[in-house]
Every structure is written in C-alpha cells, then in structure tokens.
Amino acid sequence: MNGHPSLLPPGPMLLRASLLALIAAVAWGCASARDAYVDGMDLETAGDYAGAANAYIVALERDRSLPNVAGRLQVAGRQAVRQSIERATALGPEDAALQYRSADALVRRASSVGVDLERPASFESTRDALYARAVEALYDRAEADYQTGRFSDALGHLARARTFGPSPQQVADFDGLAIDIETAWSEDDLAAGRYRSALSHAEAAAGLGASGVALANLDALRADIFAAGRVVVAVFPTEGDEDIPSLFLRDVTDVLVDEHLDGADPFLVLVPQADVRSWDRRRRRGPDLSDSPRRLGEATDDLRADLGVVVVVTDLSERETARDSETETVRVRDSQERATITTRDLDLELTARADVVTGDDAGRTVCDVSVEARGTARYTRASTAGDWRRLDLSRSQRAAFADDADDRARDEAL
C-alpha cells in the first residue's frame, strides 16, 4: 500500500473489462485466421496455388493451433513451387530468375510459420545459377542501350540486375557503367540546353563514387554546365510613391534578395547588393527604372547582368477594426483615490500591392506580375478622464496610453 495505488490489485470491474478485451482479441484472431483458411481453400480449388499458400501462411500467422492448415500449406506450396519451376524453363534469364525468386520467397514465408515446403534438391543451386545469368544478361542489355543513347533503359537494366544478389565485383562494374551512362546523359542534355537535367545527371554520376579521371571529368562537366546555364540577376532598389515609408521599400529589397533569391537556385547568380547600391548612388536617383524597359535594360547591362528585377509598390492601404471596450479601476498614486480607465483592442491590417518587373539587358520585358501581401497587428488604446501619468499602471497599460501605440503596431504589420 504505502501511497502506491498502482500496486493495488485491480478491482472487479477493471478485471472484468480486461478479461473481456482479451477474450475479444482472441476471438477476433481466431475468426480472422479461419477466414484466411477458408480463402486459401477457395484459391486452392480455383487452381491458384501460390495465392492459396499465402492465405494459409496468413492463417498460421494468426493462429498456429488451427488443424489441417499446415498440411494444406504443404500441398498448395509444393504445387506453387512446381509451377514456378515449370514456367522458368520456357523463359529468358531475367523472367526465369523472377519465377525462382517468387518461389524462394514463398519457401521463406512458409518456413517462418514452421512449414518446410517440398522442392527439388537442386532448387537453391538452380536459383543461384539463374540469378547469375540474369545479372549477366541485364548488364549486357545495359551496355547495349548505353551505346545507342537509350540512357534511361540502360539504368533500368542495371537497377533490376542489382536485385539478383550480384557479387561485390559486379556491383563495382554496375557503378562504373552507371557513371558512364549518367555522364553521357549529362553531356547530351548540356548540348541540348537542358541545364538542370544535365546537372542532375552529373550529380548522380558523382554520387556513385566517381574518382580519379572520371571525377575530374565530372568536375569539368559541372563547370561547363554552370557556365552555360547560369543567369546573372541584378535586383534594383524597390520603387514606390513618396507616401510609402522608405524603410519599408528598402526592406522589400532585402527580403526579396536574402530570403527568396540568394541561394535558391544553383543557376542564379546575384549581383552583390553593395554593387547595386553603389551604381544607384552614382546615378543620383534618376527616373524610375520600372517606367521604361529601355532604362531597365541599360541598368542591367551596366551591372553586367542578364536580367534586372525591380519591385514597384503601387499601393499600401490600412484597415482598422475596433473591438468592444472594457473598463477597470486603478489606484491613483500617492492617494487613496481610484480612477477608471477604458481600454479597447484594435486590429490593424495593412495591404501592400506591388508589380514585379523583370527585363533583360537588351531592354525587353521578360516578366511583369502583380502581387499582394497582408500584414496584421493588434494593439490597445486606453483613455481616462484625468492625467494618466498619475495612475498606478502596469507596463502594458502604460503602453496603451502612449502616443506611439498605433505607430508601433503599424511597424509590426509592415
């Protein structure tokens, strides 16, 4: 006892509930085992010996005590193995190996429930020989498809060959051929201007353990891919009307660069923002770039970029919603008097709309899209009949009386 109620014997109700749950679980297991046994007999009658054997295995997994199931599994399993062996004799290396693999999986499953399926004494040795033939045949097909530029098919053959237990030396041969295939595929994609695909295949080749000359070739190939596919982008200062806070416009530029573009794409090279700001200072805030594709193109060319991007904030509006007010009494400092203050929560929603204009160094507009974003903040305003500075207030209450409460909320929403 001693304060350990968990050590007390279960009460009659708890014991009864536990027994009922155990009985229900056992009953369900027995029923589901019998159902699987019935399914097996139906499948066996229909001539589906593999399906029947697997159903009998399920029945034994659920209840080993069921009579006759192990015997039926032995009969159906023997027939299923025999059928697989017979089919294998008329098939090519890979399909024959698949038949033996299916039979072998059935043998293993039956063994897990205590039944050793009857099979020829040469079953395992024949299986291993067929696996070896399948590996060799698939490797030959992979080489042939590689030579004719059917790279996807070639890699598929190698992937299937790996499932038949190749030797360590064969695995090394597969990797070597796969490196050659991925490299050739990458080179073809580079020549066709498919730079992302070219890079993915070069990376796949490197991931297969390329070394020595092959790795050096891949490094050179990746350098060629980046040189051909990279796009240099200059992000110019965000533009907007004079009534839009300049700090907000600057932050838009910084967020666009730092959180959305920098490092987002291996082919995207950003002109350093320090260089863009230096260029902008030299021109002494000339006409807006967004007003003229020609000016945007000239600015892009000045910075030796392929594309120039400028964001134009076209509208910044706000909507304020007041909630119900509340009143409370507080103490007046240095006196016994009480005063009433009224507080009200306000929800502020800012909506910004912008155009994002992208042009190339030749003065052509590549993309012009409009976007919209919202920011919200909640703040509290307080009022009282007298001088609130004489009241004994909490920090949050004093903040509600401060003149800059709405400004701080607006900064948060921005």
Image: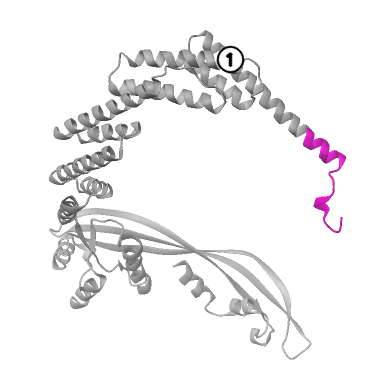
Q: Is residue 188 left or right of residue 80?
A: left
Instruction: Name the spot of residue 29 as percent of width and height, x first.
Output: 66, 26
Quarter of the figure with residue 159: top left
Q: Quadrant of the C terminus?
A: bottom left
Q: Is residue 53 left or right of residue 306?
A: right
Instruction: Name the spot of residue 397 as percent of width and height, x first.
Output: 64, 77
The residue located at (20%, 46%) in the rendering is: 198
Residue marked by disc 1: 71
> In the image shown, does 392 or 25 lie closer to the viewer?
25
Please give the range of residues in magenta: 1-19
Say whether residue 3 is magenta: yes
Task: Examine the rendered structure and indicate whether residue 179 appears above or below residue 128.
Answer: below
Say whether residue 356 is magenta: no
Q: Is residue 336 left or right of residue 199?
A: right
Task: Examine the rendered structure and indicate whether residue 212 appears above or below residue 246.
Answer: above
Instruction: Name the spot of residue 357 as percent of width and height, x first.
Output: 25, 58
Quarter of the figure with residue 99: top left
Is any part of residue 406 visible from this angle? yes
Quarter of the figure with residue 125: top left
Dot 1: element: helix
Q: The disc labelled 1 sits on which kind of residue?
A: Gly
Q: Quadrant of the N terminus?
A: bottom right
